[in-house]
Each structure stands twice: as structure tokens, then as C-alpha cells.
């Protein structure tokens, strides 16, 4: 059932004798090797595409982590810029009672192209001094500084705030 004979003629080179061999083969075996090779090729292709997809995702994750580190460092740099402002800026914040925007220095801006930078200084009010303190002739003035950085292309952003106390002459 489903078998067909194949006649093979073999010749012995030493004796010159010919011998006919009859083999039976199945007709259903034709194409099995082709199907097996196609299945192996399909599995290999799926594994290759999976590896490429995994590599692309890893690259995106690494890029996002780099952008996050850049914005973090930029916002921290802006806090240092606010801390190093002359005392007159702090006086402006006290007198005006508003939040002052402080422009980042050009060297910071030029080091971070395609990044929106912002720094603010806000007067939070007058603090109190503990009784018996040796600084009774001074009034603590409380400020809040905020540094914000946003990457224009990726949209990664970071905003850091820091509280500061400046001792001012008291009455």
C-alpha cells in the first residue's frame, strides 16, 4: 500500500558481474525533507527576529537611561547656579515677594544643546532662631531653589528643588 519498486542495477568492478537490486520506496516520503527544512528555517527565522527585537529594545532602554542621567545632572547644575548667585538676588526675592527666574550661564546652555533649562529662586519666609543661640543678632531667611531641565527631542525631564537658609542681620 503506497509502495513502489525501484530497480537499481549494480556492477561489480572486480568481476564485471551485474546485479539488479529491487528496493521498495514509499510514495508518501516525497517532500518530507522539504517540509522538515522549511520548519527548521521558520524556527530559525523566528529566533533571529526575536534577537533583533530584543537588541532594539535594549538600545532604546540604554538611550532613555542616558537622557535621564543628562537631565538629572543638568537640573543639579542649575541648583548650583542658583546657590552661587550674589546676595543681591536673594534681596530681590525678599523685596519682590515673587519667584525670580535665573538665566543659566551660557557655558551651561551651550554644553546642553536641545535642552530647555530653567532655574528659579523663591523667598519662603523668615525662620526662627532657637533661644539661647549665639546667632541671636541674625534672622534666618528661607529660600527655595528649583532647577529644571527638559530634553527637546526625547522629552526626558528632571526637576530638583533645594531649600536654603541665609542668615541676614536682624533687629
Image (cartoon, rainbow, N blue to C red):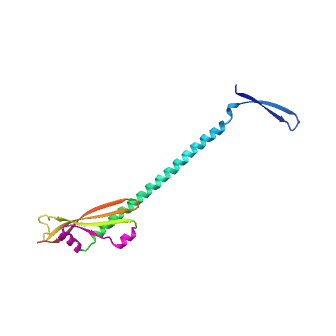
Residue stretch rendered in magenta on the structure: 87-112
97 lies above or below 48: below
Please provide percent x and percent y for residue 152. 38, 62
Residue 167 appears in the figure: no
Write the residue at 39% across / 69% down: 111
Please provide percent x and percent y for residue 125. 17, 65
Which quarter of the rendering shows the C terminus? Answer: bottom left
Determine the residue located farthest toward the front in the rendered image.
152
In the image, 155: left or right of 42? left
Residue 119 appears in the figure: yes
Which quarter of the rendering shows the N terminus? Answer: top right
Write the residue at 58% across / 45% down: 44
Determine the residue located farthest toward the top in the rendered image.
1
**Is 145 in front, or is 127?**
145
Residue 100 in magenta stretch: yes
Write the residue at 60% across / 43% down: 41
Residue 11 in magenta stretch: no
In the image, 47: left or right of 99? right
Q: Main secondary structure of the magenta part?
A: helix
Write the residue at 57% across / 42% down: 43
Amino acid at each position: 500500500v503506497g509502495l513502489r519498486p525501484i530497480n537499481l542495477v549494480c556492477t561489480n568492478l572486480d568481476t564485471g558481474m551485474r546485479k539488479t537490486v529491487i528496493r521498495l520506496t514509499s510514495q508518501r516520503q516525497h517532500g518530507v525533507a522539504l517540509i522538515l527544512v522549511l520548519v527548521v528555517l521558520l524556527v530559525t527565522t523566528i529566533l533571529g527576529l526575536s534577537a533583533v527585537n530584543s537588541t532594539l529594545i535594549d538600545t532604546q532602554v540604554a538611550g532613555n537611561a542616558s537622557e535621564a542621567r543628562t537631565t538629572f545632572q543638568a537640573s543639579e547644575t542649575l541648583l548650583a547656579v542658583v546657590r552661587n548667585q550674589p546676595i543681591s538676588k536673594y534681596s530681590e526675592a525678599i523685596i519682590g515677594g515673587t519667584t525670580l527666574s535665573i538665566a543659566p550661564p551660557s557655558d551651561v546652555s551651550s554644553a546642553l544643546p536641545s535642552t530647555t533649562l530653567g532655574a528659579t529662586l523663591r523667598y519662603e519666609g523668615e525662620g526662627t532662631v532657637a533661644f539661647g543661640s549665639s546667632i541671636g543678632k541674625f534672622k534666618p531667611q528661607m529660600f527655595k531653589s528649583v532647577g529644571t531641565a527638559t530634553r527637546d527631542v526625547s522629552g526626558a525631564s528632571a526637576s530638583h528643588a533645594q531649600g536654603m537658609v541665609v542668615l541676614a542681620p536682624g533687629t
